[in-house]
Amino acid sequence: MENHVSQKLKTSIEKIMEVNFGNNIKNGNKRQVYEAVLTATNEILAEKRYEYSKKVKEQEAKQVYYMSMEFLVGTSLKNNLWNLEAEDDIKAFLAEYGFDIEEFYEMEPDAGLGNGGLGRLASCYMDSMTTLSYPITGFSIRYEFGIFKQVIIDGWQNEFPDSWIDQAGYWLNPRADEEIEVHFFGNIKEHWTDKGLTTEHTDYVSVMAKPYDLFISGYDTEAVNTLRLWSAKSTSGFNMDLFSKGEYVKSTENEAIASSISKVLYPADDKIEGKSLRLKQQYFFVSASLQQITKEHYKKYGTFESFPDKAVIHINDTHPSLCVPELMRILMDDYGYVWDAAWDITANSLAYTNHTVMSEALEKWPIDLVKSHLPRIYSIIEEINRRFCQFIYTNHPELSASIDKMAIISEGMVKMANLCIAGSYSVNGVSKLHSDILKTDTFHNFNIVYPDKFTNVTNGITHRRWLCQANPLLSQLLTEKIGGGFKKSLSDIEKFNEFYYDEAVLSRLREIKKENKKRLADYIAQKNGIEVNCDSMFDVQVKRLHEYKRQLLNVLQIIDLYRKIKFQGFRPLPQTYIFAAKASAGYFMAKEIIRLICAVSDMVERDPDVRDFLKVVFIADYKVSLAEIIIPAADISEQISQAGKEASGTGNMKLMINGAVTLGTMDGANVEIYEAVGPENIFIFGLSTQEVNDLYHRGYRPEDFYNANQSIRDVLEFIKSGGIGGKNFDSLYHYLMYSDPYMNLADFASYCDAHRRVEEAYRDEARFTQMSLKNIANAGIFASDRSVTDYANHIWHVKPVQ
Ligand code: 26W
């Protein structure tokens, strides 16, 4: 029976064809009907949004405000139609007029408003919060250009602008009626009034923040939440005087300066870019969002005493950490609260999640930069720091020696993580191991001062996108065998364990994996011109390119295997190594590693002695929609970061639920995957976090491992001698021989041994399929539905609004 949403959608599509194009679906062209379908779907969400937000207001429900510089949304049409349970109906409706919905899915560009894990996690959480009917609003920036398009030319990464709005802007609902002004630069003047010392901000430069709302759908719920994206524009706009004086460029200068704030996403992932524009971006969306949130709260409740009971502001890593001083500024300067009252409200309304322990990613801003760009904010940070240091000296004199490490302002820098910890009531990591490292290492002094603040919420993924929509064949088999309940609550998927010995199910799983491999093989043939063997084992490593994620270790093992096949008559089972990864634009070593992977791929492709056993493919321009094609086709999930470096990982969870078996170190959430599937359904190798720390302290010398291992010597000398297609990789040879900071050589032998164990397991088809089934059936806890419920119950203390 067709659901009423589908009916409304069809009517609306026809209406839009008439109104927007003076046409009808019968005679409309693909572009027109594409636009009508997206616009109609957006309208349905807008109506549901209106109803739901009314209910939230009526029930005076506590709301979550999720502050993030990144939301890696991907495409939205398929997800929204699937969540609205209208996909099949609309597919059939369009087919009646000769339109293939799959073509519309391909026409929609990804909304790539993020770099990697942190941004995608935020989007998975928006889907889960909405499906579970929790009221949440996401806040970020409407970047005109998202994450760059990656084009590989002669093995070298080139970046091109990603103009996504033209084709996907239909999801963005402009709200000019809710524009907000944000102030930069200028001076602060303090004067005593009858109300005490007040601070005035003068000679500031104003930027107008214009909101665009992206509606977030959920599955089987009345709820629709909002992701509000701020766009920057000048308050003074075009300068007619200058123009009439012929100063054409100068006349548009203000607009250019203002709009540059929301022009482009910084492509840095795990490495800070201390650029002033990045600081302006952070303050811009934080100030606009907090001004809106406080204005709405005050209009409704007339006081901020109740603020911590009605709102929680979540800081997604340190990038929105200016929430701490900005909320203080608003409460004191705009609403006249005294310091202590303002601090009490602030520190009880903010919660912070850390996503990395990489020192180069822990943001610090030069004092002068903050002082010049945000004078009022800096004066408040100074006072927060003064009171914090006082508190430490008084209450924890034993920590006075490490005040420089704990202080918010020290060594000429403003340390954003310390500001977040001092100004939030909750600090959590994103996997058990990571949260332990935060407490025992990264923030151990703070854990002494605030033991109750530190908790853990292990990451999760929305299985509706990453299983049901990306792998419909597997989703169908699960529905047949265990019912459809798992779509709403993934804990049901555990029932699939009952089919561990069911031959029919096991062979169906193999067929499904083969189908998904064919789909990926077609993509690779089209994009890379490489024919991959779908009967070979697909070994996949897809994630941002970073030294600590050790794509280099993966390619070193491949070179070793290549040499064993070519020179030692080794005849392994056919295997295909698939890589996809973007490197931050200025990250030379990461780009060199991409160049090596591409060179190995070419070398193998040109080698008749080897290419029937081995294929290596680097698929360019990794993004959400590409991950949705690669992940369902994977047999092996490479999660090989140096232990202690990957905070959690979420790709590991996506690959697991699609039946890939993990080959990994005991790092991040791999440890919890190991606990979920048991030692016989995962391949673990390498040094543990403790062993890594011990080796560091003993002094790690990569050449010791070179001297002790013939294969390492063979592989490195092969690289040095131009063995890889005659190309020069001296920089990587020296990097491995004389620094190798992430211990690729120390874990090489154990890693190669693990690969031999993988091959042996994969040869036993029935056994391997059972391992695959175990990974699917035990993925329930890695649902982002479980993660957000943990946040809701243990950190945010919010209830669903039915
Ligand atoms: C300042 C530049 C910058 C930009 C982004 C520094 C750090 C980041 C992010 C924190 C990097 C990131 O995405 N971290 C990843 O977050 C995921 C979600 O929690 C984790 O699963 C990954 O392990 C972690 O690397």
Image (cartoon, rainbow, N blue to C red):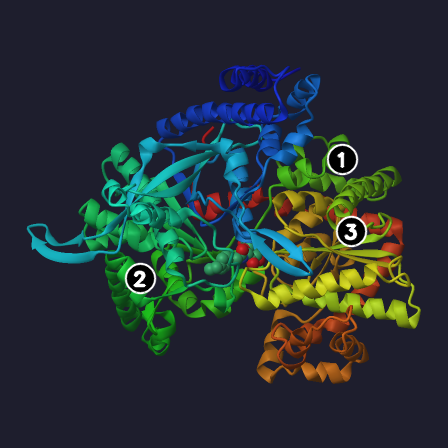
* Any part of residue 430 in sight: no
**Closer to the eye: label 2 or 1:** 2
Instruction: Out of 601 and 709, give the one closest to the viewer.
Output: 601
- Res 296 → quadrant: top left
Amino acid of disc 3: Asp
Residue 546's label in the rendered image is: none
User: Which of the 4 quarters of the picture holds residue 503?
Assistant: top right
Residue under numbered circle 1: 473
Q: Can you see residue 580?
A: yes
Residue at the spot 61% in from the left edge and 70% down from the top edge: 689
- Of 782 and 465, the residue lying toward us: 465
The residue under label 2 is which amino acid type? Val
| Residue beneath disc 3 | 635
Q: CA distance from mark 3 to mark 1?
A: 16 Å
Is the residue indicated by label 2 positioned so its CB lies within 8 Å of ligand 1?
no
Label at residue 370: 2
Question: Residue 488's spot in the image, x, y percent?
Answer: 61, 34
Question: Considering the numbered disc 3 on the image, is that residue within a helix, a strand or a loop?
Answer: loop
